[in-house]
Amino acid sequence: MWTFRKCRTTYRVLGALTALAAVLCAGPVEAEDSDRQTSDRVLSERIRQELTEDPGVTVDEIQIDVSDRIVTLDGTVGTLMSKDRAAAITETIRGVRSVVNMIQVLPDGQASDEDIRRDIEAAWLSDPATDSYEVKAQVRDGMATLSGAVDSYPERDLCEHVARTVRGVTAVQNNIRVNYKSTRDDREIAAEIRRLHHFNAYIDRASQIDVRVKDGKVTLRGTVGSVAERTRATDDAWVAGVRDVAVDDLQVNVWAKDSLRRKRKNPVVSDAALTQAVKDALLHDPRVNMFDIKVTSDLRRVTLRGEVDNLKARRSAVQDARNTYGVWHVYDRITVVPNEDVSDAAIKQKVKRAIRRNPLLDPYRIDVAVRSGNVRLTGTVDTYFEKAQADDLASTVHGVGFVNNDLDVNYGDTGLSYYPFTDPVYPRDLDWYDFEPTATTKSDKEIRNEIRDELWWSPFVDADQVAVTVEDGTATLTGAVDSWFERQKASENAREGGAVHVVNNLTFVDQTEIE
């Protein structure tokens, strides 16, 4: 008979094997740079700080062990979402070579396996991106096993993502098959992966990744600057026709010099190339690729036009365009036209049930009203993080065209950070989010030093490109960066460093002038 004790033992054996694999593929430790000494102890303290400051992670029961910059997370959390988020945040910290996630999920409450199974399948049916997939779930002792078939690996991953957000799920085994309708030439697959890598704003050293394909099996070799970058490069490799991706030889070298960065290697991005890159990104996104979205680019300012039938698709398309390297601005001209066959009463019930299924939101009393596909949320939650989660969750429901988020926040003195691998929407795109710190006890010099520290630790910002001045608690950022995302992330680093206000005067590098 399967018991929790056996399940826990199995996870620890798998975790140990994962740890060994992580050591083998993490690559050699590079020499320290001249400015920092990131010992295992310092790295552990930084990880603890990042997890403590994040409202989506309960860090009290998490143990952090760092050995040779390979991080092992252990302990217990209440939700699978918290476990996943802890690992994803750790991956974004400069200096980390690999992350082994051995955290155990001990859910609050007593949801039965049958209730969890029904909730997973209801979540798929409620989501317009997954409602037509022929997939099913089985649950035993909280572990969900997914089966069925879809047409692509991004669809497979989306099914798993939805399942992992359901209350009571402690682990997911994804056995969903990918049935390709046709085969593709290896050279065509390799060319598409290289294009995705090149135009992914999160992959800063795309020119350092060697892509080889044989019989549909992809092998990635080379060097990236962070574990998060390695994860994104791996995700991009799962294009149509791919049957396996091997990344053991894709090493994390966190001390790679600026001369290896993409802006030095690939200086020219034409509007024609940018338009095609955004189209490729939209086709790779299962929330968007079923819609006819027109893409144009003028002076690297991208305009999206077309109709979608749900709010989440619109938001995802905007994020896909922003995440494309070379895009300076996105004009959102997409119209949400919900299907007329979904009544307001049906939408209301789906949103309420989606909230009940979510382990972060279920404890709260959130009222839902719907009129002509527009959802209004009222009630009270503890944090902006939970308010943003409710907003995003409502946007994923079939038929929702707009979310009027009137939830009150009990603890409004903590804002939202933005981690692109975990957060579904950029906070300042939400019309209700206007958080700014109101006061500080730090001196201007202390704030500036902490901002510089935040910029250095981030794998997403080239700190050498950003100059920081602070006066009366207001931080001013000047210099030139390479992408919309890097510009916004620098602002967040300034807030995390203690700035009361941020004046972001960062411009974009004119890459046609870089030699």
Image: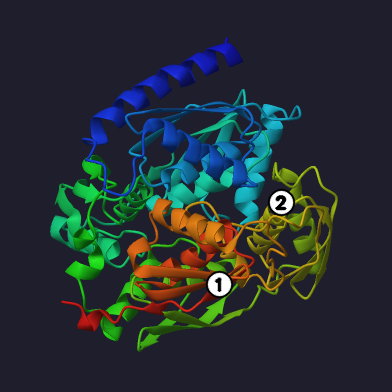
- Report the residue at 62% width, 67% height from top: 473
* Quadrant holding the N terminus: top right
Q: Examine the rendering and report whether any part of residue 288 can be seen.
A: no
Q: Amino acid at mark 2?
A: Ala
Q: Quadrant of residue 278?
A: bottom left
Q: CA distance from mark 1 to mark 2?
A: 20 Å
Could you classify mark 1 by the number of other residues whose Cα lies within 10 Å: few (under 14), some (14-19), or many (20 or more)?
A: many
Quarter of the image for residue 485 reads bottom left
- 315 over 236 or under it: above or below: below
Side of 5 relative to 112 (left or right):
left
Q: Residue at x 26, y 53 (%)?
A: 241
Q: Residues within 10 Å of mark 2 (few under 14, many from 20)?
A: many
User: Looking at numbered disc 1 in the image, what kind of residue is underneath it?
Assistant: Arg
For this rendering, which residue is in front, 127 or 12? 12
Please state if 237 lies on the left or on the right of 124 as rendered: left
Label 2 SS? helix
Q: Position of residue 58 (x, y in %)?
A: 64, 37
Tell me if 70 is positioned left or right of 171 in this view: left
Q: Point out residue 197 in the picture as x, y percentages from the top left corner.
A: 28, 61
Residue 505, which numbered label? none
Q: Locate residue 62, reporting x and y percent.
A: 57, 29
Give left or right: position of 511 versus 313.
Answer: left
Instruction: Name the residue beneath numbered marker 2.
Output: 354
Q: Nearer the viewer, residue 201 or 155?
A: 201
Q: Earlier in the sequence, mark 1 or mark 2?
A: 1
- For mark 1, give the secondary structure: helix
Contact between marks 1 and 2 (CB within 8 A): the answer is: no
Q: Which residue is mark 1?
A: 314
Q: Quadrant of the C terminus?
A: bottom left
